[in-house]
Image (cartoon, grey):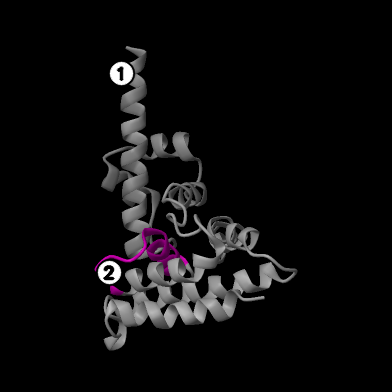
Amino acid sequence: MDETRHRDREATRRRILDAAHRLFSKLGYEQVTMRMIAAEAGANIALINRYFGSKRDLFAEVLAGRGRFPGVLEGSVEELPGRLAEYVAERLHSERGSPVMEALSQSSSSPEIHGIMRDRVTSAILEPMAALLPGPDAIFRATVATALITGAGTLRQLYGPGVLGTPGHEAMVARLTAVFEACLRT
């Protein structure tokens, strides 16, 4: 019985998180209400409050649960510019943007969650990248690269896949690799 209850609780938690992510990505933080999330998840508001607390806490959990910077920061630092370029090119050409960037883009106008968004970008991209880079100005170089990555996400959100007639994937990767090499070089 306890195991069944635990599985049901986890399934309900997952439904709430998935519903919240869909709504935050589509409408943005300020436009989404707890009632909307409850209706989308097939749960009641009291249950959402018990599992997550406030809407702000739920938003933070949605961002935290949506993966890290997938595999891009793993491997040699010499190949990092190419991996970053590949990631950004893939995002720009993809039919579906990054789930985290969707939620961040739609919600960026809400001052209530700026700290959450800043913490997410810092912990998922900026600090791990800076830790890989040699030299005294690693934070600065990682910040410039992070600006390119997040800016590309915003551009993808505004224009959709195949941003403004971008060239093929290989040409995009080659150009972005050169840009990231310039950003990350000591």
Q: Is residue 25 above or below residue 152?
A: above
Drawn side of residue 10 relative to residue 60, left or right: left
Residue found at the far bottom of this picture:
165
Using the rendered image of the protein, determine whether residue 109 is visible from the camera's viewpoint.
no
Please provide percent x and percent y for residue 161.
Answer: 27, 75
Q: Secondary structure at mark 2?
A: loop
Observer-nearest residue: 144 or 35?
144
Q: Residue at x 45, y 70 (%)?
A: 82
Q: Say the numbered circle drawn on residue 150.
A: none
Drawn side of residue 140 relative to residue 22, left or right: right
> Which residue is the site of mark 2?
94
Q: Mark 2 vs mark 1: which is more N-terminal?
A: 1
Between the C-alphas of marks 2 and 1, the distance is 39 Å
Q: Residue at x 51, y 76 (%)?
A: 180
Residue type at tag 1: Thr
Q: Secondary structure at mark 1?
A: helix
User: Which quadrant holds the C terminus?
Assistant: bottom right
Please provide percent x and percent y for residue 92.
Answer: 33, 74
Q: Residue at x 59, y 63 (%)?
A: 126
Residue interval drawn in magenta: 93-107
Would residue 131 be counted in the magenta stretch? no
Please provide percent x and percent y for residue 146.
Answer: 54, 70
Q: Quadrant of residue 171?
A: bottom left
Q: Quadrant of residue 25?
A: bottom left
Kindly report the secondary structure that dominates the magenta region of the rendered protein: helix
> Which residue is the site of mark 1?
4
Q: Residue at x 62, y 76 (%)?
A: 185
Residue found at the far top of this picture:
1
Please provide percent x and percent y for residue 96.
Answer: 28, 65
Would residue 104 be counted in the magenta stretch? yes
